[in-house]
Amino acid sequence: MVQSIARTLDEEMARDERVVVVGEDVGKRGGVFLATEKLFDKYGPDRVIDSPLSEAAIIGAAVGMAAHGLRPVAEIQFSDYVYPGFDQLVSQVAKLRYRSGGQFTAPIVVRMPAGGGVKGGHHHSQSPEAHFVHTAGLKVVFPSTPSDARGLLKSAIRDDDPVVFMEPKRLYRAVKEELPDDLDALVPIGKAAVRRVGDDVVLVSYGGSMAETARAAEALAEQGVSPHVIDLRSLAPWDEETVLEAVARVGRVVLVSEAPRTASVMSEVAATITEELLDQLLAPPLRVSGFDTPYPYAQDREYLPGPARIMRAVQRVLDY
Amino acid sequence: MARELRLPELAESVVEGEIIRWLVAEGDSVALDQPVAEVLTDKATVELPSPFAGTLLKHVAAEGDVVQVNAVIALIEEADASTAGKAPPTAPASGAGASGTGASTAETVDDGDKLSLFKPSAGGDTEALPRMRRPADRSSGARATADQAGKTRPAAAGGGQVANSSAEGAAGAAAEGSAVGTRLGREPARGAFGRVLAVPAARKLARELGVSIEEVLGSGPHGRVRVDDVRGHVPPAAGQGQTGPQGSPLPYKTPAGYEDREERAPMRGLRRLTANQMVTSHLHTVRALHVDEADVTDLVALREKLKPSFAAKGVRLSYLPFVMKAVAVALAEFPALNSSLDEVKGEIVTKRYYNIGMATATAAGLFVPVIRDVDKLSVMEIAAEVGRLAESARGGKLAPDDLKGGTFSVTNIGSFGGLFSFPIINSPEAAILGVHSIKKRPVVMRDDSIQARHMLYLSLSFDHRLVDGAEGAQFTSRVIGLLENPVALMLDL
């Protein structure tokens, strides 16, 4: 997946000279995860900019570049580090189009590796997507496959509005896929993917948790339970239609995300399902999530919603 | 775009309505809010306005059909689809991909099999995966017992049990031990705030089928009612809630040779509703009759005296307002007469409000409009309300709410002659008072003289489950006392 991102950045920088990359160690080092590998050699220091250790400066500089016609792709080394840049992101990036009455847009992509599962402790494992989803003016995507990462990153770079591009770091080198040759193979922002069609329960997930959801789905199918699996891919806007259609048909839904439970993206999905489809539900929408605690140093695997927890939730909605 | 016209909830707790007449024919255009049909509910006829403008494609329900609230009764091709609201998705839409998956729906997987990308190594699960109980295993138990126990039902609480030819004893006992059929006489499973435990989709289905969710026995955890429980629910026959034996409908056979001298017409509308209500009352009450007479000579004189002053205000004064007033006073003293039995919960509901229905014969049939809070009204106000409701009833203009909320009924049979009658209780009320004609009769007075007095027969028909004979007699005596001494009645006002 991380190679897919590096390749996509290369493709987009070659396609459009306004695309620049800025972030900590993104230049000579090629990024700590090598998501910007070789870009410095190819495009030079004017378009691949090593920034100081200041997320506020990275995002703030991106706002200025965007206002002057560039299409910056900012990298936040870990999503956990975004908070010093939060003011720039929420107050400047998200508002620029509105504050200028449409004179300026902020065609900025802010990439950030997110999520746990790499034994990184609480400062390298968080899933802060709800902050951004809750901020009007930002689009938020969180792909789980290399081809979605490529298609969504292309869409994000070409979008005139700011997109927070979250990357499941524990899948960087865990999922492999042949990418299409088509340089314009876009994945539209706001469209979910149906990964499996089934009749007994709808599983909705995104990002890193798609891995556990996929394995739960496989185990369920082996045991005669037919899961319908949806990868949201986009969190803001999210694809209500695809989710509601499936839940209206099946009547049971389990929402899987490793982010802390309270006020999470899945809380919003659950609320929408309840508001729109109450009469068609056979069981309450259940969330399988991370916990309302700081991400632990130990019990990394236990914190993440694994297949067993997902399956127990499925059993609950089946038995309800 | 073709839109569904559904029968709306025309009044609170109305669950069904009868299509009396279509006002817009198939193929005709219909304007927004134009009345499309006349619908009869609880004896009130209302015109149903169209929520769409366009062309009426099809009458899904025919005239004479009784349809449940929310059921589709017609299809209307909407003229301007852009005004159509966003309907919640109910049917699966076909996915973008072309490859079929062999699944039972039209949906397809987007973009091929991506789930297999996630190898176990990506997560390194260490926890053993649970064994799932499969859907078939989950529900088979409840279904099997439902079949075994069939259609038997435990008898209602509060007596009134009638010997049942279908081995009630054995099967009823079996039903006690299993999750089957209806739950009459048993307490439903309740969650927080006293709500019956039920899956939302089961509630919706129950609403659509006109089934009370309280009567469905749940097979889910903690007795929760599920969709299959509602589907498998054995509804009390013909929309009634009766618990006794329900025979199959009786056919009528024309005697040989009389074929040409009989007519047949479908039983519809008010006649059918009245019949259903009578059956409900007959099967759900234990009627007892108490008859007495009142010497209303003084009341006759009083009425004659008051008539002109009432007439001056445009109010016609009959005897009914006095009777209602007396009944309201007596009801407050004998609350059992103003109660109802909740058979489902096995509870007696005593009402602290006095809404008295007055049986009213019209050319269209029998109505029982209700006068509210009679205890708080003057005779003048009651008389005015009697006049208004009687006129509305005869003009077919009663609103659904005019017919609801009665706690006791009075039926004035006197104008049609007869000595006394045995009225049918207007369920779920506890009693009804028959008021008969006032006639002069020779009466032996206290001093043994014989005088011509204005005499009135009263017949109280009461549900003996709720009201004992002594209470019935005392109540009637109290009403008589007030009618015989109208000054006392006035003092009670």
Image (cartoon, grey):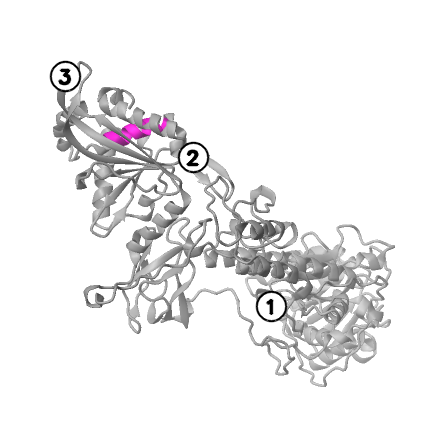
Q: Quadrant of the C terminus of chain B?
A: top left
Residue lying farthest to the top in this orientation:
B447
Mark 1 element type: helix
Residue position for label 3:
B449
Q: In the image as oriented, which residue stretches furthest toward the bottom?
A: A181
Q: Is residue B325 magenta?
A: yes
Q: Main secondary structure of the magenta part?
A: helix
At which x and y percent is residue A218? 75, 71
Percent coordinates x, y for residue A97 in the rendering? 59, 63
Magenta stretch in the rendered image? B322-332
CA–CA distance in space, label 3 to label 2? 41 Å
Number of the label disc, if any, that sits on residue A246: 1
Up/down of B81 relative to B45, above or below = below
Do the dots labelled 2 and 1 sit on one chain?
A: no
Query: Pointer 3 and pointer 1: residues touching (CB < 8 Å)?
Result: no
Check disc 2 and give the amino acid type. Leu
Q: Quadrant of residue B436?
A: top left
Write the residue at 82% across / 62% down. A52
Residue B37 in sight here: no
On whether residue B44 falls in the magenta region, the answer is no
Q: Which residue is mark 2?
A: B466
Q: Position of residue A50 (x, y in %)?
A: 81, 68
Distance CA(mark 3)–CA(mark 1): 89 Å
